[in-house]
Amino acid sequence: MKLEFQKTILRFRAKFMGSSKKKKLTSEAFVLPSTSSESAEEQDLDEDEYSGLYYYLQPKKKRELSVTVQVINQKLEQVYHEFRPSTEVVLGQIHLYSVIHKQVTDLFKCVDVYAFGSAVNGFGYLESDMDLTIIGFSEHQMKRTKEGLLEDLKAYLMEEENVQENGLSDAMLLAKTKFPLIKMQSNFNGHSYFLDLGINSRKGISNSLLLNCYARIDKRVRLLDMVVKEWTKLNHLFGGSKQRFNSYSLTLMVIYYLQRGIKPPLLPNLHQEVMDIFNVQFNEDPFEVIKEFELKFDPEEQEMTLIELFFGFVEFYDSFDFKNELIAIHKKENVSSGYVFSFGKNIFAQN
């Protein structure tokens, strides 16, 4: 995995800057100066040619690139908004969550249902699944085992009366896995929603809260996350099932780079500053605590544009010691990779 990633970076460098690895990767290497005296806004652009993210992330020769950095950033931001779920889709998710929540708590008393993952952490896109977890089963209930409880729940959710409300067209129990869950599909208002429902994913809830706080600090965080993910897809580095990068690991890499890879940083270390609020009990409103902390941190001190941040991301991980260092967004100092899980080969991330 590490080798594939580094080969992709080298190919990327060669296309934009020639073969010298010592040359610095900058936005000037990506874009040729305009041959016209017109400003970026006045240039006659082929909207069809530049409408897709594919154009900007595919390796191209210098002579083919005549658009300014400003236009590239504008176009990437447009694509980002196209990738974001529409208001209608988000409202559908909220409605579906409330229906599932009611049906689960009707069947199992004294439990609660939380949403987590990309649908709520601020880094979700059109194709994002909705992850749900049930918290609060009693010791007596857990004697039924997670698999047994989920089997009961699956049957209950698929009852005709409940399907009329939740719109489920399919539900499958994955019992023989490390974390048993029900995979479901719901059709609501002409849109298909894919849901994963499990038990006691407390870490997933707190991680989603933490990521959401990072996503809200500066819009460039979400934009860079989208660009990096699309770049890895185009270079066949994306897909967790094949031991390639998954969405969560790439988001951690983006956050870590924005904390440690640029000066001044675009992101603070929230875990160090306000770590006590990242729990499932939510004794205080975490967003209010974060808002107070944000008053002391100004992301606008970092003036790099989106495309400059993307090149910086490539530069940073090109020289990163994947074998010995850990990508840990909760630490301010370098951390050894000796005690955490590895992603692929010689790529370590702190969950």
Image (cartoon, rainbow, N blue to C red):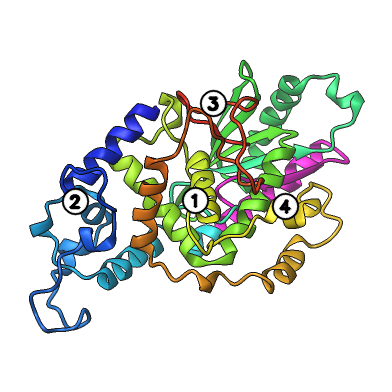
Q: Is residue 107 magenta?
A: yes
Please state, as top left, top right, bottom left or bottom right, where the N terminus lies in the image: top left
Q: Quadrant of residue 319?
A: top left
- Residue drawn at x 48%, y 52% is 261
Q: CA distance from mark 2 to mark 3?
A: 31 Å
- Residue drawn at x 33%, y 61% is 307
Q: Nearer the viewer, residue 219 or 152?
A: 219
- Residue identified by numbered label 2: 16
Could you tell me which secondary element the residue under label 3 belongs to? Answer: loop
Q: CA distance from mark 2 to mark 1?
A: 22 Å
Q: Position of residue 269 (x, y in %)?
A: 65, 55
- Residue identified by numbered label 4: 272
Q: Nearer the viewer, residue 49 or 89?
A: 49
Position of residue 27 relative to residue 315, above or below, is: below
Could you tell me which secondary element the residue under label 4 belongs to? Answer: helix
Q: Which one is in front in this view, the residue at disc 1 or the one at disc 3? A: 1
Earlier along the polypeptide chain: callout 4 or callout 1?
Answer: 1
- Residue identified by numbered label 3: 342
Q: Position of residue 246 (x, y in %)?
A: 47, 36
From this viewpoint, which residue is outermost toward the front?
22
Q: Is residue 255 magenta?
A: no
